[in-house]
Image: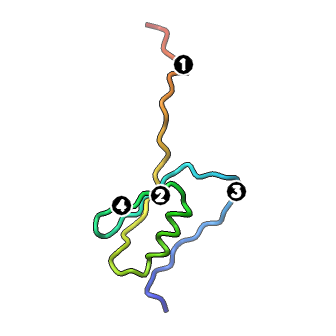
Amino acid sequence: MSSISQMEVFQQTSYDPYDRHTYKVYLCNGKIKHFEFYDDAKNFWFSNVRKVNYLNYITVEDPKQIKSSSGFKNQSK
């Protein structure tokens, strides 16, 4: 039996291209690896999962919101 705990897997519900998030893999030594694409983060994780005291956790970062100068403005002043 493997000592690696079971990872929860989710079913894909859409095949449309979508990857607006970024991903951070936190290493046990305090370093952070940044990835723009999920597949890259996933490949890095599974390529290194058997290294002892190497991987800590992974986070999904929301896309940065771009502030727009357009839209509604308060005209009551």
Query: In whole angstroms, how far apart are the C-alphas of marks 3 and 2?
Result: 22 Å
Pointer 4: residues within 10 angstroms few (<14), some, or many (20+)?
Answer: some
Q: Residue placed at 35% from the left, 74% from the top?
A: 54
Tell which of 61 and 72 is nearer to you. Answer: 61
Q: Are marks 3 and 2 in contact (CB under 8 Å)?
A: no
Q: For mark 2, what is the residue?
A: 35
Q: Which residue type does callout 1 highlight? A: Phe
Secondary structure of the residue carrying tag 1 is loop
Q: For mark 3, what is the residue?
A: 14
Query: In whole angstroms, how far apart are the C-alphas of marks 1 and 4?
Result: 39 Å
Query: In whole angstroms, how far apart are the C-alphas of marks 1 and 2?
Result: 35 Å
Query: In whole angstroms, how far apart are the C-alphas of marks 3 and 4?
Result: 29 Å
Q: For mark 1, what is the residue?
A: 72
Q: Which residue type does callout 2 highlight? A: Phe
| Labelled disc at residue 54 | none
Query: In whole angstroms, how far apart are the C-alphas of marks 3 and 1?
Result: 33 Å
Q: For mark 4, what is the residue?
A: 32
Residue 2 is situated, as x and y percent measured from the top left of the image, at 47, 88
Q: Are marks 1 and 4 in contact (CB under 8 Å)?
A: no
Pointer 2: residues within 10 angstroms few (<14), some, or many (20+)?
Answer: some
